[in-house]
Amino acid sequence: MQTETVNNMTSQALTISAEQTAMPPGFLARFLMFTVVSSITIGMGKLVTTLFAVQIGASPTQVGLIASTEWLGMLIVTLPAGFVIARFGARRVYFAATMGPMLISLLLPFTNVWYLLAAGRGGAGFCYPFRIVSMNSSFWEFLTRIGHHKAGWYRASGAIGTALLAPLLGNWVITAGGVFGAYWVIAALFAGIALYSWTLLPERPVVQANHAEAGSPSIGSQIRAIAGDPRISECCLVEMIDSATLALVSTFLIVLAMQVLHFSQHEAVNLLMAQGAMSITMLLVFGRLAARLKRRTAYMISLTGAALGLILLGCGEGFAAIAVGVVLVSGSEALVHLVNVNELSRHPGTKSKISGIYGLAQMLGAFAGSLLGSFLSHYFGLRMVFLIWLPLLLVAGVLIYVRARRTGKLSPG
């Protein structure tokens, strides 16, 4: 009798969940546009803060520390973010988490030393994971109905905002209105997307969510079970390495271009746009191809491409060589993302919790990339950092190859 009652409750919870996650009309187009604007706020914040730091005389090490404090804030709360969203719903959490960066953007222009900029970016970093995991899990829930060949569309729309439109808008706003104008435009965008999120993201009543979770194990045991899944753990490991490499490049690209190679600000922004354009193209166009690749074969291709990109960044001199290096690193990371999202969106577990653990791997990699890059650049010089990073990719490739040979899952290609 007790078993029958539990089964009835589970069946009822699944029915409620299916009703609540029914895809609204026009959801995909509205969600992707929302992602573009939401990503613009993050990308503009990073760019404007980096340019502001350069203006006030911050060194490459200090610029790296500013970036790493943001990643540290994100790292701390990414894992609990997935469980908070599972409890309260994406809509409420996203709205609340957008208020913090809005207020910080209003205050940052009043700073004039690098460590206050770092504190502000760290505070924003505490809020971002709740926004990112809310959107990630919402997209994953609908991916089966949208089509797995579109697995990269969410990330692509984010790249359009972060890496393509944000550099253009950020450069234009800070040139036209200075630091105050740029940060206040960012704050206005945060306010706008917070209000719009209330009409778009899915909402789950707390009582129903609790019924679905009745009798569930502790959070710690859930985390161990999810992280212990071989598919999830390998996806997260490779994502962490690729995120660290991309963060290394993204954090120091403007400094490399303007302070080391003496490119103009316009050329530096063009490099950011080249990075974003490659990522967007990969994510939008190569979804079907990535779905056909063996997961570990895709990993090996990605690590090889990233290694070639780092060599060009460490040794290249002209704009073209640096641009090709940036494109290779960006394309490699996009390929890993396509393969991983295809894999994880098919997993039967709660999407917000898996997304939280996957996001933790991304944040840990990004934090390590920016922080280690800061210290390595201090002792070895910025250009050498890209070459010093190569053994990490080599070790990762060897480990993946050995593991694939043991399980017999590495494709001949």
Image (spheres, grey):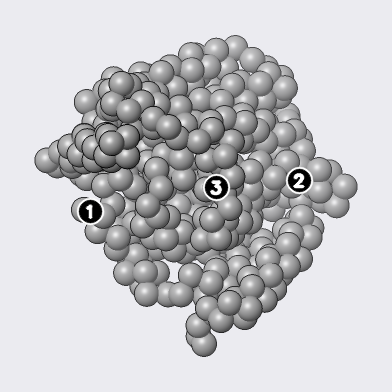
Q: Nearer the viewer, residue 90 or 216?
A: 216
Q: Which residue is mark 3?
A: 225
* Sequence-first tag of 1 and 2: 1
In the depicted structure, whether residue 111 falls above or below residue 335:
above
The amino acid type, in three-letter code, at marker 2 is Leu
Q: Which residue in the rendered view is the most extreme toward the right?
A: 379
In the depicted structure, whether residue 146 falls above or below residue 57:
below
- Residue under the image location 42 percent in, 75 percent down: 293
**Quadrant housing residue 237:** bottom right
Measure how far apart labels 1 and 2 are at the Cα level: 39 Å
The amino acid type, in three-letter code, at marker 3 is Ala
Q: Which residue is mark 2?
A: 372
Q: Which residue is mark 1?
A: 146
- Residue 207 spot, x, y in % from top left: 30, 21
Q: Badge 3 local density, few (<14 within 10 Å), some, or many (20+)? A: few
Q: Quadrant of the N terminus?
A: top left
* Sequence-first tag of 3 and 2: 3
Q: Badge 2 local density, few (<14 within 10 Å), some, or many (20+)? A: many
The amino acid type, in three-letter code, at marker 1 is Ile
- Residue 243 spot, x, y in % from top left: 58, 51
Measure how far apart labels 3 and 2 are at the Cα level: 30 Å
- Residue under the image location 37 percent in, 69 percent down: 291
- Find out whether the residues at labels 1 and 2 contact each other: C-beta distance under 8 Å: no
Which mark lies nearer to you, 1 or 3?
A: 3
